[in-house]
Amino acid sequence: MRHIDIQKLCDDARFRKFHLLLLCWCALIIIFDGYDLAVVGIALPSIMKDMGIQPTSAGFMVSSALLGMMIGAVFLGTIADRIGRVPAIVICLLLFSVFTAAAGFTRDPVTFGIARFLAGLGIGGVMPNVVAQMTEYSPRKIRSTMVTVMFSGYSVGGMLAALVGKAMIERYGWQSVFIAAGLPALLAPVILKFMPESLAFLVRTGRSDSLKKILPRVDPAYVPQQADSFSLFEREAAPGSTIKRLFAEGRGVSTVMLWIAFFMCLFMVYALSSWLTKLMASAGHSLGSALTFVLVLNFGAMIGAIGGGWLADRFNIKHVLIVMYALAAISISLLGVKVPVGVLFFLVGLAGASTIGTQIVTYAFAGQYYPTAIRSTGIGWASGVGRSGAILAPIVIGFLVSKALPLQQNFVAIAIPGVIAMLAVCLIDSRRPRPDRIAPVAAEADPA
């Protein structure tokens, strides 16, 4: 009987067609997710005008989706470790596609907020699951790069929302960009059929036949045999609550610091995503120009995510994050300073790279910090707790906008969390040895 350590097999594998296909599937899901998330910020000025609402009320409308994201990240991130990641991902896809489209048919702030809350469950829930999925299957040497390249789809989705908004809002109304978000729901059965399930889930549920079909695609050098048994070596496989394990093995302080970093980074991300268009319009830029800033923000985010992942695979990912958070605080605080348009575009791009891009690298950091058996739970709780920062951001900045403060003060308020996140990351003990290969969880081969 052969004993196969499946995580080691994945760690040591070379990048192959299997990894590329998985990367494409996960990136496509994140593109849809990014579109659904960014579309509100793109359409916000038109929604406010059409519904006749004030900035503070608009902030609550935006935050309804973010509240759903917080609940979705915790619940659907945790439940995926029990029902499987692929079913959880499909549930999330259906939630954010169907209910974002439904928001386009609403005519009042309350109904709009309810639809966005339900969409937020899927938007928030899908993130920890695709990160955990990509982290688990990626070769160790390029793991951060794989996760951040995948997550750069978030920025592509934001740019797509800006482009669709520029093409459709003035001609067909803000509702059109929401209704278009329902199309990805058609892919749900395809994803359910073709996306590979979590290896950890297959081991825990004893699905040896499925493992024998997947592992040769990960590494063709593995030739399955009838007597093969499979195991995932990790102490966290012992019985007990997966939530409690987030604080075990000396992870307590670091888990809390990771939550703080998520909170602060998501505050910056959603403050910019929700209010950049409005703030730039109030500074005298036309709606078309303001939407161009959103394009630049998301293009910078894509560069920051991929570049940050590349750096994280070559240097200490913790140190990379510290630098990126510092750049976020500096670039955002300078957005309110009167500078030439070219410099302003550069600062907006840098802000995107160091906020949205940094958040993506932070997801990669969380995915590597937690062992496989609690990875979805760890990322889900970090993302879920951090969503409270995302919820507060549109409300707080909406309140500041309603006070007609100088432009620079609004951007300084968005930049301060960058300093706090930088300090939190400094306190994370990334040197703690991970007990990934201590106690095995085995799935014996089916005797038949």
Image: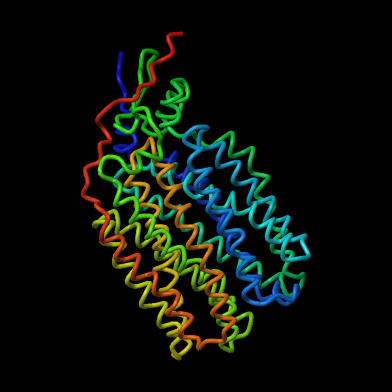
Q: Nearer the viewer, residue 53 or 220?
A: 53
Indicate left or right for 43 with 157 as reference. Answer: right
Q: Nearer the viewer, residue 350 or 111?
A: 111
Vertical order, 244 against 395 (above or below): above
How many dots with numbers? Answer: 0
Indicate left or right for 439 with 48 as reference. Answer: left
Vertical order, 99 against 248 (above or below): below
Say which residue appears at 32% left-offset and 58% top-offset.
310
Q: Quadrant of the N terminus?
A: top left
Say which residue appears at 39% left-offset and 50% top-offset.
146
What's the image's color scheme? rainbow
Q: Position of residue 250 (x, y in %)?
A: 25, 44
Indicate left or right for 377 with 35 as reference. Answer: left
Say which residue appears at 34% left-offset and 47% top-offset.
143
User: Residue 108: which quarter of the image?
Assistant: bottom right
Q: Position of residue 401 (x, y in %)?
A: 56, 81
Q: Position of residue 303 (x, y in %)?
A: 41, 65
Q: Position of residue 324 (x, y in %)?
A: 33, 67
